[in-house]
């Protein structure tokens, strides 16, 4: 099943010069391809759309502050079962709980600064891709 997912390399990944390392791990997966890529700063409106499900939670405000603290790299990744696969490659939200070998397990520090976002379902992927890459057919 070929799918498309949205990946964000968060501001900590950019600051720590991990863009190449993370994209390298994604591209190393056979059959996965980066089909669009953009570095950009995220405004409040975009973040509210993207992380709207978390509005009102205690971590929401610090999350938005962190996500707007520097540029992110937004990617479209396509491939076989890429939605589930990228969530596994990223590892659990909390880097302490993430296995070595996963991106968050190898490089993550605290739960908020966990380097990477990847859509968590087909519905999320469709919704999020529209926010970041509205021109995509
Ligand atoms: P993401 O949406 O960024 O891919 O991460 P996720 O699905 O693994 O985690 P989610 O529950 O959607 O949370 C979104 C992001 O909010 C930050 N967070 N901080 N307790 C906390 O301080 C806390 N919980 C979550 C993380 O940056 C998380 O990735
Ligand atoms: Mg999430």
Image (spheres, helix red, strand yellow):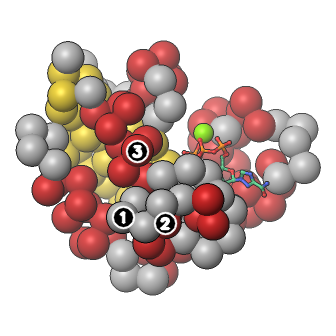
- Callout 1 touching callout 2 (CB < 8 Å): yes
Q: Nearer the viewer, residue 52 or 131?
A: 52
Q: State the image coordinates of residue 121 (x, y, percent, origin top left).
A: 47, 24
Q: Quadrant of residue 88?
A: top left
Residue at which label 3 appears = 88
Q: State the image coordinates of residue 133 (x, y, percent, origin top left).
A: 36, 35
Residue at which label 1 appears = 101
Q: Is residue 39 above or below residue 126?
A: below
- Identity of the residue drawn at 16% across and 49% down: 29
Q: CA distance from mark 1 to mark 2?
A: 6 Å
- Identity of the residue drawn at 72% across and 55% down: 64
Q: State the image coordinates of residue 134 (x, y, percent, origin top left).
A: 38, 28
Q: CA distance from mark 3 to mark 1?
A: 10 Å
> Left of 113 or right of it: where is 13?
left
Q: Nearer the viewer, residue 75 or 41?
A: 75
Q: Quadrant of residue 45?
A: top right
> Left of 121 or right of it: where is 74?
left
Disc 1 packing (10 Å; few <14; some 14–19; many ≥20): few
**Ligand 1 neighbours mark 3 (CB distance < 8 Å):** no
Q: Quadrant of the N terminus?
A: top left
Residue at which label 2 appears = 105
Label 3 sits on a secondary structure element that is helix
- Identity of the residue drawn at 36% across and 64% down: 101
């Amino acid at each position: 099943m070929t799918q498309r997912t949205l990946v964000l390399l968060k501001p900590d990944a950019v600051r720590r010069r991990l863009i190449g390392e993370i994209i390298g791990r994604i591209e190393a997966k056979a059959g996965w391809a980066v089909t669009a890529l953009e570095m950009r700063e995220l405004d409040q409106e975009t973040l509210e759309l993207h992380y709207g499900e978390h509005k009102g939670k205690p971590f929401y405000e610090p999350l938005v502050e962190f996500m707007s603290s520097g540029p992110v790299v937004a990617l479209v990744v396509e491939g076989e079962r890429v939605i589930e696969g990228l969530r596994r490659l990223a590892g659990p939200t909390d880097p302490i709980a993430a296995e070595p070998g996963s991106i968050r397990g190898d490089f993550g520090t605290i739960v908020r600064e966990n380097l990477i976002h990847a859509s968590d379902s087909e519905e999320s992927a469709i919704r999020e891709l529209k926010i970041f890459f509205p021109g995509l057919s």
